[in-house]
Image (cartoon, helix red, strand yellow):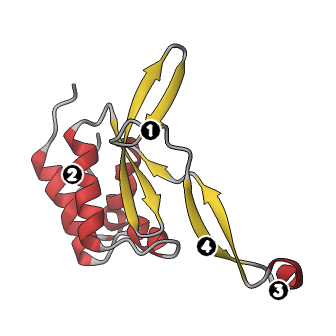
Amino acid sequence: MMSIDRQYIEHKKDVVRSGNCSLLKEWQNHSKITVDQMIEMVEWIEEDPEKNYAALTADGWKPLTKRTERTLTVFRDLEGNAWDGETFRMPVPEKQQEIYGKTMDRTQKVAISYGDLRFITRDFDEDASEVKEVRL
Protein backbone atom coordinates (compact mmCIF):
# COMPACT_ATOMS: atom_id res chain seq x y z
CA MET A 1 0.00 0.00 0.00
CA MET A 2 1.17 3.53 -0.74
CA SER A 3 2.32 5.68 2.16
CA ILE A 4 0.03 8.63 2.81
CA ASP A 5 1.44 12.09 3.37
CA ARG A 6 -0.78 13.59 6.08
CA GLN A 7 0.42 17.10 5.27
CA TYR A 8 -0.78 16.78 1.67
CA ILE A 9 -4.13 15.37 2.83
CA GLU A 10 -4.58 18.37 5.13
CA HIS A 11 -3.61 20.66 2.24
CA LYS A 12 -6.38 19.12 0.09
CA LYS A 13 -8.89 19.60 2.89
CA ASP A 14 -7.77 23.22 3.37
CA VAL A 15 -8.28 23.92 -0.35
CA VAL A 16 -11.80 22.46 -0.15
CA ARG A 17 -12.58 24.55 2.97
CA SER A 18 -11.20 27.73 1.34
CA GLY A 19 -13.75 27.63 -1.49
CA ASN A 20 -10.98 27.39 -4.12
CA CYS A 21 -11.70 23.80 -5.10
CA SER A 22 -12.79 23.75 -8.74
CA LEU A 23 -13.73 20.06 -8.46
CA LEU A 24 -16.18 20.82 -5.63
CA LYS A 25 -17.61 23.79 -7.55
CA GLU A 26 -18.13 21.62 -10.63
CA TRP A 27 -19.77 18.84 -8.61
CA GLN A 28 -22.06 21.37 -6.90
CA ASN A 29 -23.46 22.21 -10.36
CA HIS A 30 -24.92 18.68 -10.44
CA SER A 31 -25.27 17.69 -6.78
CA LYS A 32 -26.02 18.98 -3.30
CA ILE A 33 -22.53 17.92 -2.10
CA THR A 34 -21.23 20.09 0.75
CA VAL A 35 -17.73 21.06 1.84
CA ASP A 36 -17.96 18.64 4.78
CA GLN A 37 -19.06 15.81 2.50
CA MET A 38 -16.18 16.53 0.10
CA ILE A 39 -13.72 16.37 3.00
CA GLU A 40 -15.23 13.04 4.14
CA MET A 41 -14.82 11.80 0.58
CA VAL A 42 -11.14 12.79 0.49
CA GLU A 43 -10.55 11.00 3.81
CA TRP A 44 -12.34 7.86 2.52
CA ILE A 45 -10.23 7.69 -0.65
CA GLU A 46 -6.98 8.44 1.20
CA GLU A 47 -7.73 5.65 3.71
CA ASP A 48 -7.02 3.01 1.02
CA PRO A 49 -6.02 4.68 -2.26
CA GLU A 50 -5.71 1.39 -4.15
CA LYS A 51 -9.26 0.25 -3.39
CA ASN A 52 -11.45 3.18 -2.28
CA TYR A 53 -13.37 5.29 -4.78
CA ALA A 54 -16.22 7.77 -4.44
CA ALA A 55 -19.32 8.27 -6.56
CA LEU A 56 -21.12 11.57 -6.96
CA THR A 57 -24.79 11.33 -5.99
CA ALA A 58 -27.60 13.86 -6.20
CA ASP A 59 -27.30 14.42 -2.43
CA GLY A 60 -23.52 14.20 -2.00
CA TRP A 61 -21.29 11.17 -2.44
CA LYS A 62 -21.25 7.41 -1.92
CA PRO A 63 -18.23 5.30 -0.95
CA LEU A 64 -17.28 2.59 -3.43
CA THR A 65 -14.69 -0.16 -3.44
CA LYS A 66 -12.89 -1.46 -6.50
CA ARG A 67 -12.73 -5.23 -6.84
CA THR A 68 -11.33 -7.55 -9.45
CA GLU A 69 -13.74 -10.40 -10.05
CA ARG A 70 -12.45 -13.00 -12.48
CA THR A 71 -11.30 -10.81 -15.35
CA LEU A 72 -13.53 -7.79 -14.63
CA THR A 73 -13.06 -4.73 -12.47
CA VAL A 74 -16.26 -4.04 -10.54
CA PHE A 75 -17.17 -1.10 -8.33
CA ARG A 76 -19.35 -2.03 -5.37
CA ASP A 77 -21.04 -0.04 -2.63
CA LEU A 78 -20.38 -0.90 1.01
CA GLU A 79 -23.28 -3.38 1.05
CA GLY A 80 -21.57 -5.34 -1.74
CA ASN A 81 -23.96 -4.32 -4.53
CA ALA A 82 -22.49 -3.61 -7.95
CA TRP A 83 -22.59 0.13 -8.64
CA ASP A 84 -24.21 1.08 -11.91
CA GLY A 85 -24.37 4.84 -11.65
CA GLU A 86 -26.62 7.35 -9.93
CA THR A 87 -29.81 9.06 -11.06
CA PHE A 88 -29.70 12.83 -11.57
CA ARG A 89 -32.54 15.17 -12.51
CA MET A 90 -31.33 17.08 -15.56
CA PRO A 91 -32.83 20.07 -17.42
CA VAL A 92 -34.16 19.28 -20.89
CA PRO A 93 -33.21 21.57 -23.80
CA GLU A 94 -36.06 23.92 -24.70
CA LYS A 95 -36.64 22.32 -28.12
CA GLN A 96 -37.31 18.93 -26.52
CA GLN A 97 -39.43 20.10 -23.56
CA GLU A 98 -42.66 19.56 -25.48
CA ILE A 99 -41.82 15.84 -25.64
CA TYR A 100 -40.01 15.25 -22.33
CA GLY A 101 -41.04 18.09 -20.03
CA LYS A 102 -38.65 20.53 -18.33
CA THR A 103 -36.55 17.91 -16.55
CA MET A 104 -35.71 14.23 -16.93
CA ASP A 105 -33.94 11.64 -14.82
CA ARG A 106 -30.67 10.32 -16.23
CA THR A 107 -28.32 7.72 -14.86
CA GLN A 108 -24.71 8.89 -14.85
CA LYS A 109 -21.50 7.30 -13.63
CA VAL A 110 -19.42 10.01 -12.00
CA ALA A 111 -16.69 8.64 -9.75
CA ILE A 112 -13.36 9.82 -8.40
CA SER A 113 -10.22 7.87 -7.59
CA TYR A 114 -7.05 8.64 -5.65
CA GLY A 115 -5.37 9.86 -8.84
CA ASP A 116 -8.24 12.29 -9.43
CA LEU A 117 -7.70 13.97 -6.05
CA ARG A 118 -4.90 16.01 -7.65
CA PHE A 119 -7.69 18.12 -9.23
CA ILE A 120 -8.63 19.37 -5.76
CA THR A 121 -5.37 21.28 -5.45
CA ARG A 122 -4.36 21.81 -9.08
CA ASP A 123 -5.90 25.25 -9.61
CA PHE A 124 -5.02 26.44 -6.12
CA ASP A 125 -1.39 25.31 -6.37
CA GLU A 126 -0.92 26.98 -9.75
CA ASP A 127 -2.47 30.28 -8.61
CA ALA A 128 -1.05 30.62 -5.09
CA SER A 129 2.61 31.59 -4.89
CA GLU A 130 2.87 30.59 -1.23
CA VAL A 131 1.82 27.01 -1.99
CA LYS A 132 4.36 24.83 -3.74
CA GLU A 133 3.25 22.20 -6.23
CA VAL A 134 3.10 18.78 -4.69
CA ARG A 135 3.79 15.75 -6.86
CA LEU A 136 2.40 12.33 -6.02
- Neighbourhood count class around disc 2 (C-alpha, 10 Å): few under 14, some 14–19, many 20 upward: some
Q: Label 3 near label 2: C-beta < 8 Å?
A: no
**Residue at 21%, 63% in the rendered image:** 13
Q: What secondary structure is found at the residue carrying circle 1?
A: loop
Q: Which of 61 and 121 is in front in this view?
A: 61
Q: Disc 2 and disc 3: Cα gap in Å?
A: 40 Å
> From what the image shows, is residue 5 above or below residue 1?
below
Sequence-wise first label, 1 or 4: 1
Sequence-wise first label, 1 or 3: 1
Sequence-wise first label, 4 or 3: 4
Q: Residue 94 carries which label?
A: 3
Q: Which quarter of the rendered picture does the N terminus lie within?
A: top left
Q: Which residue lies furthest to the top in this view?
A: 70
Amino acid marked by disc 1: Asn
Q: Which of 69 and 131 is in front in this view?
A: 69
- Of labels 1 and 2, the one closer to you: 1
Q: Position of residue 136 (x, y in %)?
A: 29, 39
Q: Residue 89 carries which label?
A: 4
**Residue at 41%, 26% in the rendered image:** 67
Identify residue for label 2. Answer: 43
Sequence-wise first label, 2 or 3: 2
Q: Where is residue 126 in the image (x, y as percent from the top left)?
A: 35, 63
Q: Disc 1 and disc 4: Cα gap in Å?
A: 23 Å
Sequence-wise first label, 1 or 2: 2
Q: Disc 1 and disc 2: Cα gap in Å?
A: 22 Å
Sequence-wise first label, 4 or 2: 2
- Of labels 1 and 3, the one closer to you: 1
Q: In the picture provided, is 1 more to the left or to the right than 54?
A: left
> From what the image shows, is residue 94 above or below residue 125?
below
Amino acid marked by disc 3: Glu
Q: Residue furthest left?
A: 6
